[in-house]
Image (cartoon, rainbow, N blue to C red):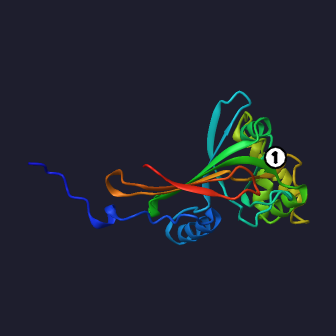
């Protein structure tokens, strides 16, 4: 006799991910829930990039702008924005291959969102505005760092940070390094995933061909 547990009504229910909707609206709903239910950094996301010859790399960054009104430098169509040192390893990969993928994994909510598409660099004015919205100590830390490059000893970095702090403390802000910038991912594919027992997960994928194109969507097998 089988000892398998019968599937309950919740597992047998139809998808709770709406068909024909706007994925940006669904993202806003989930992101709002994550800001309440996820303990640490609900705006943390894995950013995957690749070199010009397609060698992949991934790391965590923070989402700093999003939504259908997030305008990738005049192109429209909405997007997801993050900031980084363009001379870092990830920055070099982005410059070489302006495509990326994002992953939000909200473990406390048992949800994840995957997003893929081309990257568009933000304007210098946008980069300036965000850089100077950060706490002074964060500006110093970023400007002092040759991110991803070899560091002979930690004291070298600390000394540089201290020098920058003293040089700009009276003004209360540090000039933004030209290589410190931001990128907006203009999505072509967005997938929403909800964890269900026994691998009966709920997945819906939204796809469009261009920033101004309509979305099509479908459920996916888990």
Q: Position of residue 56 (x, y in %)?
A: 63, 34
Instruction: Indicate left or right for 169 with 43 as reference.
Output: right
The percent position of residue 10, horizontal first and vertical second, equals 33, 66
Q: Residues within 10 Å of mark 1 (few under 14, many from 20)?
A: some
List the single residue furthest toward the top.
Answer: 53
Nearest the viewer among 214 and 8 is 214
The answer to whether one can see residue 105 in this image is no
Judged from the image, the secondary structure of the residue bearing numbered disc 1 is: helix
Find residue 95 and report its horizontal and vertical position in percent.
Answer: 80, 39
**Residue nearest the observer in this picture, 80 or 106:** 80
Q: Where does label 1 land, which residue?
A: 160
Expressed as whole percent of the image width and height from the top left, the position of residue 200 reads: 36, 54
Does residue 29 appear to the left or right of 61 in the view shown?
A: left
Where 14 sits versus 146, above or below? below
| 26 displayed left or right of 80 | left
Q: Is residue 41 visible?
A: yes
């Amino acid at each position: 006799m089988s000892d398998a547990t019968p599937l309950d009504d919740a597992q047998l229910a139809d998808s709770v991910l709406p068909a024909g909707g706007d994925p940006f609206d669904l993202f806003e709903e989930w992101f709002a829930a994550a800001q309440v239910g996820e303990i640490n950094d609900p705006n943390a996301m894995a950013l995957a990039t690749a070199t010009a010859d397609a060698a992949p790399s991934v790391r965590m960054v923070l989402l700093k702008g999003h939504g259908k009104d997030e305008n990738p430098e005049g192109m429209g169509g909405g997007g997801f924005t993050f900031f980084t040192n363009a001379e870092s390893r990830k920055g070099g990969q982005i410059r070489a291959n302006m495509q990326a993928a994002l992953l939000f994994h909200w473990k406390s909510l048992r949800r994840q969102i995957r997003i893929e598409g081309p990257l568009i660099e933000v304007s210098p004015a946008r980069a300036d505005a965000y850089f100077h919205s950060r706490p002074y100590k964060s500006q110093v830390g970023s400007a002092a760092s040759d991110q991803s490059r070899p560091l002979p000893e930690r004291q070298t970095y600390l000394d540089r940070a201290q020098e920058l702090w003293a040089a700009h403390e009276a003004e209360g802000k540090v000039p933004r390094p030209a290589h410190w910038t931001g990128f907006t991912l203009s999505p072509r594919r967005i997938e929403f995933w909800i964890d269900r027992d026994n691998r009966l997960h709920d997945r819906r994928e939204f796809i469009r061909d261009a920033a101004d194109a309509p979305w099509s969507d479908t459920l996916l097998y888990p």
